[in-house]
Image (tube, grey):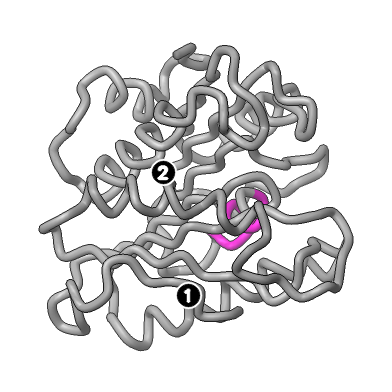
Amino acid sequence: MTSGETLPRGEAAPGTTTGVVLVAHGGQASSTEPTSALQPAVLRMIPVGLAIRHALRGSGTVVQRPRFRVRGWNGMQASPVGDLNQMLDAIAADFGPVPVVLVGHSMGARAAVRAAGHTAVSAVAGLAPWLPPGEPAGHLAGRKLLLVHSTSDSITSPAETWAFVERARAVTEVAAVEVRDGDHPMLRRARLWHAIAAEFARAALGLPAADQVLAAAVTATAAPRTVL
């Protein structure tokens, strides 16, 4: 995994860090092409990371926006999952037992959900996730989970996301949010997508709500799903 960008630099260090948020970008089903900082899927995570950084300012939380080595999931290789696990190992070694929150988009959401079985992870959010039938859920026991999708998404399947929600609810508490009139790149209603990610990070780290309506939505584990 490439270093990407850490937000904010220098705000927290080993011994003073209270939590870590990793923001994982999307990609493709199959590709061994290296990622670059200028690819749209990578660039799309910049405002997401900034929104989370703003929401967590002063909390001692480190927000990191790393890049996967290659663009694709690549079948059984699950390439980005290995990258995330390597980074989670490094976080545990550097910062000790601090809570780690994963926030991923599309393929990055699938990678985040899969990597959430790592002992360092306490919560995971998938934005417009790619969660095909058969994607495992048993490893999510004890993790906070949020899945957000739009029924207008033509790239990844909202129906598959809602089906995964039901599978995951057999082992853990899950909040599900439907974004009306959204799209897969999260460009339509972008501010709402960003705010959802930021509010989930606050809730996952035990911080007071910044927006009561969004805080209720991202923690509404008893509802089938919340429509925003």
Mark nearer the viewer, 1 or 2: 1
Q: Is residue 76 above or below residue 205?
A: below
Label 2 environment density (alpha carbons within 10 Å; few <14, some 14–19, many ≥20) = many
Extreme residue toward the front, this view: 38
Relative depth, front residue between 58 and 148: 58
Q: Earlier in the sequence, mark 1 or mark 2?
A: 1
Image point (37%, 71%), residue name: 6
Give the left or right position of residue 2, taking residue 92 as reference. Answer: right
Give the left or right position of residue 135, taking residue 200 as reference. Answer: right
| Image quarter in which the N terminus is found | bottom right
Proximity of marks 1 and 2: CB atoms separated by less than 8 Å = no
Q: Position of residue 78 (x, y in %)?
A: 77, 65
Residue type highlighted by circle 2: Lys
Q: Position of residue 151 (x, y in %)?
A: 67, 17
Image point (87%, 65%), residue name: 31
Q: Is residue 200 above or below residue 21?
A: above
Image point (66%, 24%), residue name: 162
Q: Which residue is mark 1?
A: 88
Relative depth, front residue between 128 and 49: 49
Relative depth, front residue between 123 and 59: 59
Q: Which residue is mark 2?
A: 144
Q: Main secondary structure of the magenta part?
A: helix
| Image quarter in which the C terminus is found | top left
Q: CA distance from mark 1 to mark 2?
A: 17 Å
Q: Is residue 124 above or below residue 61?
A: above
Question: Which label belongs to residue 27?
Answer: none
Q: Which residues are magenta?
A: 110-116
Label 1 environment density (alpha carbons within 10 Å; few <14, some 14–19, many ≥20) = many
Extreme residue toward the bottom, this view: 93
Give the left or right position of residue 120, taking residue 40 as reference. Answer: left
Residue type highlighted by circle 1: Leu
Is residue 3 covered in magenta? no
